[in-house]
Amino acid sequence: MVVDVSGASDANLVVAVGRWHQHALAEIYRRHGGAVHSLARRILRSDAPAEEITQEVFLDLWNHPEKFDPQRGTLRSFLLARTHGKSVDVVRSETARRRREERTSRETATSGYDIDHEVWDMAVAEQVQEALVALPDELRHPIELAYFRGHTYREVAVMLEQPEGTVKSRIRSGLVKLRTSLAERGVRPAGAEQ
Amino acid sequence: MSGQPSQLDHIEIQELLGVYALDAVDPETAALIDGHLEECVRCSIEVTQHHEVAGLLANSGGTSPADLWDGIARQLDSSAPPSWEGLAGKLEAGDDRTERVVGSSTVVPITSGGSRRRRAGRVGVVVAAVAAAVVAVGLGLQVHHLDNQVSALSSRPSLTAAERTALASPSTRQVVLKAGPGATTGPGGHGGPGKVTVVLTSSGTGFVEAGGLVGIPRFRTYQLWGVIGGKTISLGLLGSHPGVVPFSAAGGTVTVFAITDESAGGVVTTTNQPVVEGGVSA
């Protein structure tokens, strides 16, 4: 059988992973490993656990390729969603352990919180940055706290001193506005072109 | 807020979809939403869209440490299962545990079983149908409208309500696949395959009604292919006794559909002749 992974679609690579072709997983790693690792590091703020999460994500794909459903989004979205879930689990377990020692969550939200700088560090596409920055603060801040800091919406509500219902609504509205804004800029979901 | 909800209605869950997509809900609430998404197409679409946005935000485009892959590869080496060739005999003997099913809803025939994956696949088809109706994103596929065949296909009892909805959409197209060179020469001994129809929504997703294909041994599978931009791309595995199977061809213009007979698990590229094939007419 001829296997040419360099030109294979993501879906075809997952098929090959399903047949235990390591070179297919290596190609998937080449395409998406950087994004996975960057997201994990961004949330965990540490190299070692970020590398552990990255390994877990790709080993999970190796062991359970059937969990990827191409009808529910791109492979990159799938991998990043898995990365995010695993990363926030780590964050929350760490948070629980340190909770009694740290009572600065509100202070973090108001003074130590520098998401704009980190967004720039992400070096995401210019359009994505513009769309994010263009969001009103009241929509952007809860998204950043929930997604990049791994806080639950209830924690975000406390941090921002807002009702939980308001936070829920603003995160949802913010995501919808971001999607619209990105679509207007011609930005498609990552990996959709493959 | 005190305590955790034991039940949430549709409206309450809708309000939570954004925070759910960002993993910002507690595990109990997430489980309730998971259950709802199994059945609710509208909410499934919204979560998918939120995940896409989150993926864009997360995309740093950076590189991972050079030695990280080596660590992953070492673990693959230490835990790698037997080669596929070694598994073929087990598959032939009916050892389901060793069969790797890839692509979930593109693999599991909708008409068989009642598993979670089956429900997820159905939701996927419903998503496609609703997306076709709401989003109406055309891919420029040039396929004949065959209203009489829509009517005939709609009457099949194996079709779900979602698939009938997709068929009823004005933008839905159909391609009837006819016997190809592999129908008589393939390893499955297909004889004269019956009618096989590909139904394609404007969003690029759809399903293939492949009940007309002759059943083949369980260690083999039918595989659906689409020619997109001159390249032959796998659109999914159909199984050895396919019925109605959803697939996705979103992101490209399909000019030819074909189905081949392959070893179970499918192949990345095929050298087999199509059992059935059909061009997408201009």
Image (cartoon, coloured by chain):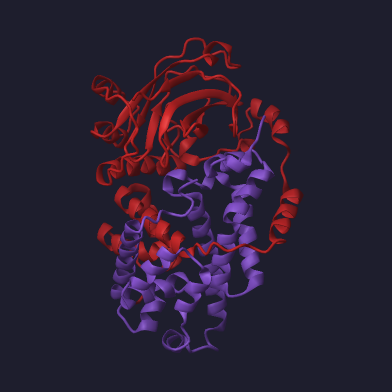
Residue B142 at what x, y percent from top left?
33, 29
Instruction: Please state which of residues B46 and B160 is positioned toward the viewer in this rendering.
Output: B46
Chain seen in red: B
Q: Position of residue A25 (x, y in %)?
A: 64, 47
Relative to A17, residue A171 above or below: below
Asked if residue B166 lies left or right of residue B118, the reply is left
Query: At x 63% / y 48%, what residue is drawn?
Result: A27
- In this picture, residue A71 sits left or right of residue A179: right
Rendering quarter of residue B248: top left
| Picture residue at 42% right of the left edge, 42% below the top | B251
- Where residue B195 sits: x, y (%)? 39, 17
Q: Is residue A60 left or right of residue B89?
A: left
Q: Where the N terminus of chain B falls, by quadrant?
A: bottom left
Q: Considering only vertical position in the picture, is A165 above or below B12?
A: below
Can residue A30 be seen from the camera position used here? yes
The front one of B59 and B54 is B59
Task: Give residue A36's quadrant in the image.
Answer: bottom right
Residue B147 or residue B106, whichever sits in front: B147
Query: Which of A44/B63 is in front?
Result: B63
Indicate the colour of chain A. Answer: purple
**Residue B159: x, y in percent?**
33, 29
Q: How many marks?
A: 0
In which quadrant is the C terminus of chain B drawn?
Answer: top left
Q: Is residue A44 left or right of residue B246?
A: right
Q: Residue at x 53, y 23 (%)?
A: B260
> Is any atom of residue B4 visible in this view?
no
- Please say if B224 is above or below B204: above
Residue A67 to residue A34: above or below: above
